[in-house]
Every structure is written in C-alpha cells, then in structure tokens.
Amino acid sequence: MPTRFSKNRKKRGHVSAGHGRVGKHRKHPSGRGNAGGQHHHRILFDKYHPGYFGKVGMRTFHYTDNRHFCPTVNVEALWNLLPKDAQEQAEKDKSKAPVLDVTAAGFSKVLGRGSLPKVPLIVKAKFFSRIAEKKIKAVGGICELTA
C-alpha cells in the first residue's frame, strides 16, 4: 500500500494521532502475549479458558509407545476385513462361520461401534470390548482371545 493511502497521513498535525492524550500509545502496557494470566488478566483467563493452569493426571516418567500400542477396529468394519469370496460363502452357508484374525490385519482390540450382518463370524483378537463381544455373540459368532 502506498504511503499516501496510510491512515497516518490524515492524522498529520493532530497531536496524539488518534491515540488519546491521557492513556497514551505505549509499547506493551499490559505485557506481551499471555503475560499476567494469573495476575492482572486473571478474569479473562478464568472466563474464556477455564482449566488453563494447573496439572491433571499421573506422570509417566519413561513413557514408551510400545507398551501402549493397541490399534483398534470397530465391529462395523470387521466384515470388510474378510475377503469377498469368504463373505459370499458365509452368506450362502450359515452353518460354517468364517474365521477372521484381526491381529493379521494389524489390529489388537475390537470395539463395539456399528452393527454386524446377521451372519455368524469367528473373530480372533487380543482384546474385545464388552459391547463388541455382545454384538458378535448376538449374530451367532464367537470371540476368541489370542496371545
């Protein structure tokens, strides 16, 4: 933007340039950034950012991702992990339930979101949530725990 269009050009000759005589236009009168969150800006922090200060939970001194590695899959996605021919075979002949090993697909735990088609399915996994187990058994399937 050229200088001639800047707002300051209009204010030439006016003593305080729109910033007032009493308050004055100083550099950082209330501190820079988040300064004063526990002091002079406390009301703002408490009102708009409750819980900003303080701690919560337990500390884990040497957190390792490997110990907490547990990829999950929902019940609604189980059927898609089966190959197409196995799906068609299971829908035709409901006396033989297909076996689905979710650990082979890279999952450890089966969670209970969604629904299953009314075809029995044998699911092998390291962990099952309570709701997932209930839904799999409701369609005549089996939950098998693996190591």
Image (cartoon, helix red, strand yellow):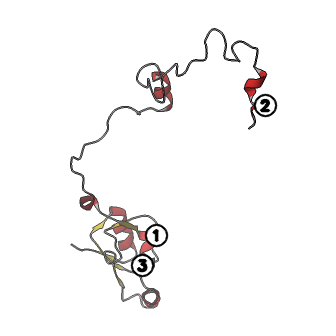
As rendered, which of 39 and 18 lies closer to the eye?
Answer: 18
Circle 2: element type: helix
Check residue 4 in the rendering and tell me which mark sits there, or answer none: 2
Disc 3: CA contacts within 10 A as few (<14), some (14-19) or many (>=20):
some
Q: Position of residue 144 (x, y in %)?
A: 27, 75
Q: Is residue 145 left or right of residue 32?
A: left
Q: Is residue 66 left or right of residue 51?
A: left
Q: Residue at 43% of width from left, 85% of height from top?
A: 83
Figure quadrant of residue 12: top right
Q: Which residue type carries mark 1?
A: Ser
| Nearer mark to the viewer, of 2 and 1 | 2
First in sequence: mark 1 vs mark 3? 3
Disc 1: CA contacts within 10 A as few (<14), some (14-19) or many (>=20):
some
As rendered, which of 56 and 138 lies closer to the eye?
Answer: 56
Check residue 92 in the rendering and tell me which mark sits there, or answer none: none
| Nearer mark to the viewer, of 2 and 3 | 2
Q: Is residue 116 above or below residue 15?
A: below
Figure quadrant of residue 75: bottom left
As rendered, which of 112 and 38 lies closer to the eye?
Answer: 38
The residue wearing badge 1 is: 115
| Nearer mark to the viewer, of 1 and 3 | 3
Check residue 81 in the rendering and tell me which mark sits there, or answer none: 3
